[in-house]
Structures are given as structure tokens and as C-alpha cells.
Image (cartoon, helix red, strand yellow):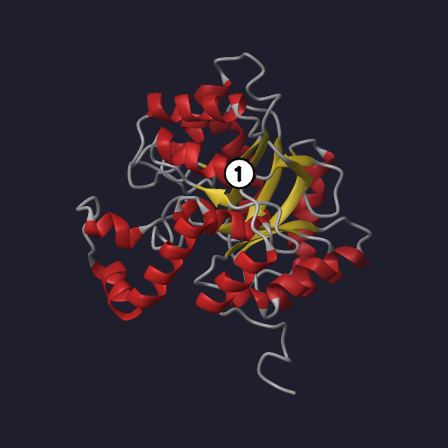
Amino acid sequence: MEYTHLGRTGLSVSRAILGTMNFGPETSEDDSHAIMDKAHESGVNFFDTANVYGRAIAYGTTESIIGRWFAKGGDRREKTVLATKLYGDMGEWPNSGKLSAYNIRHAIDASLERLQTDHIDLIQFHHIDRATPWDEIWGAIEVAVTQGKILYVGSSNFAGWHIAEAQEAAKARHFLGLVSEQSIYNLIKREIELEVLPAAQKYGLGVIPWSPLNGGLLGGIIGKEQEGKRRLEGRSAEYVKDHREQLEAFENLAKEIGHAPGEVALAWLLHQPGVTGPITGPRTMAQFDSAVAAVDVTLDADALAKLDAIFPGHKPAPEDYAW
């Protein structure tokens, strides 16, 4: 396994990141525990979750599954860099979500209880809260850091200017501020190259892409459809209908490179500047194994150029749309 520092911090994290969104609703607790054990065996030390994950069953389901895994002992917690998120509503009562000081305090305490741990390594704001001032947010976070409940702070789904605003407010308080940004980023969805990636690099944030296979579209969907292994429905069917030639070109290139399409798509992200590592949310052990294998895939300049030709990206703003 390869490791890198998370943004400008001294924290070492694996370049393969285990996402847990499917634990509970799609993956049984026993299978979830087995995947987490395999992650440690493979050298994966960075696990990502959120307080809202598993809400199809009940609020906090996924965190509770992870907490019961930690409770098995064997240095499971000590070997894990644990990231979770807050923002989403955890109930119908007022102040059960967003980034008020009130909710930050209650959300962190509730996550600690479900996760059966005394601290969270990386707490992430799941979305920007336009109604709460940064002085309130950072004040609440500073208290949690002082109490030893959290170590680092990250953002998710922020615009570039949100990152700048957050960091300038933190700087004025002589506080570290954000150390990571979790955004949708893959060969198909490359909008963060306009402003989010430049902002993250400017302020020293590690970028953690979510949906690295764009809902499975980059996981060999054409081949699976032809083999009868996947039935296309809804938005996936619509996208394939409109972009079949593009996806076929990608899957043919993956064959030429000698790796599965999903591994090539993940490896491409690992070759992008500022990317810490992609989050993969496996439902099965086989999906996890494929995600880990991507760390060892090397793409040369020719392969990267061909991928850019199939899925054109963006230059940083404003050059992308102005002189």
C-alpha cells in the first residue's frame, strides 16, 4: 500500500480510502466487518463514513456498525484514521443538522457514542451552511479540538470560494482550519478542476474524490451490459445511450492498458495533482479488492493523454472560459 500525507498535515493515510456508505443498507454487518478486516490486512488505514449513512435503516446505522467492529479490539481503532461527517439532519426536531455550534457539539458527541471511540481523527462538514458564520463554526470546532474529541477538520462539496472563505476566517483566529476537501471527481465529472482543485492546492488541502466511478459508469458498464451482468435503468441508461462511443473507447483503452476499467479510472485519479486518494464504497469483497489493486496501476503519459482525449477536462478558471 502507498501512503501520503493528508494535505499539509503530518498525518499519513493510505491512498486507497475505504468508504462505508453501503454498510448496513447494502452490505450486511458481518460482511462489512470482513471488508474492514481485509482493509487492514491490505494496509488501508483511512476509513470514511458519515453520521447520516445507513439512514434507510435508521439514523447512524453505519457508524454503529463501525463502532461494533472497533469494539472487537485487536488494535482496530488504533490502526484506523477515522473520518466522519456532520451537517445532514439526524431527526425532524430543529437544530438536528447544519453547522450551528449547537449541532456541531451534539453531532460530534453522538458520533463518538455510535463509533465507540473517544475521538474522531477527521470531522468533515458534509455541505456548506450558508446561514452560520465561520466565527461560530470555528469557535465550536476549537472547543472540540481542545476537548480532544477531534483532531482535524475537512470539508465536503464546497465551492472554491467556500474553501477560501473558511481558510481566511481560520487564519484570522490562528487556527489550522480545513485540511481536506471531499468532492465528486472522476473522468466524467471534472468540474472541480475549474476552482475547487486550485483552491485546495493553494490552501494545502488534500482532495478526496467521492463517486470515483461515477455511479459505476466507469466500472466497465458496456461490457457488463453485453454480458448480461448489469441492467441499465434510469440516469445510467440515459447516459450510456448518449455517450456509448465514449464509454466504449474508454473500455477499449483499459483493455489496451491491461487493467479493468474501474482500476484505470481509480488510477487516473491517483495521478492527478493534489489528490490524496479516491473513496470507494464497496458492497462486496471483490469490489474492495479491485479498488485496492488500482493503487499499483501506473499510467504513462500516453495513457493519460488518451484518457484526457476521451474525457476532456478543464483548465483552472478563468482561463477555461476567458482569455
- The front one of 263 and 214 is 263
> For mark 1, what is the residue?
17
- Name which residue lies at 58% across and 66% down: 193
State the count of labels.
1
Q: How crowded is mark 1: few (under 14 residues within 10 Å), some or many (20 or more)?
A: many
Q: Which amino acid does label 1 sit on?
A: Ile
Q: Which of 268 and 319 is in front in this view?
A: 268
Q: In this view, does 133 lie to the left or right of 238?
A: right
Residue situated in front as seen by the camera: 273 or 150: 273
Residue at 63% over, 35% down: 2
Q: Position of residue 283 (x, y in %)?
A: 34, 35
Asked which quadrant contains residue 304, the reply is: bottom right
Q: Can residue 115 be seen in this view?
A: yes
User: Which residue is situated farthest in the bottom direction here?
Assistant: 323
Instruction: Assign the C terminus to one quadrant of the image.
Output: bottom right
Q: Which of 1 and 47 is in front in this view?
A: 1
Image quadrant containing the N terminus:
top right
| Vertical side of 256 occupied by 60: above or below | above
Q: In this view, does 77 lie above or below 240?
A: above
Where is residue 176? Give x, y as percent: 76, 48
Residue 201 located left or right of residue 28: right
Residue shown at the point (26%, 62%) measured from the top left: 235
**Residue 56 image point, x, y percent:** 29, 41
193 left or right of 246 in image: right
Residue depicted at 41% across the width and 40% down the height: 281
Which of the 4 image quadrants contains residue 136? bottom right
Task: Give percent across and percent down for residue 187.
Answer: 47, 60
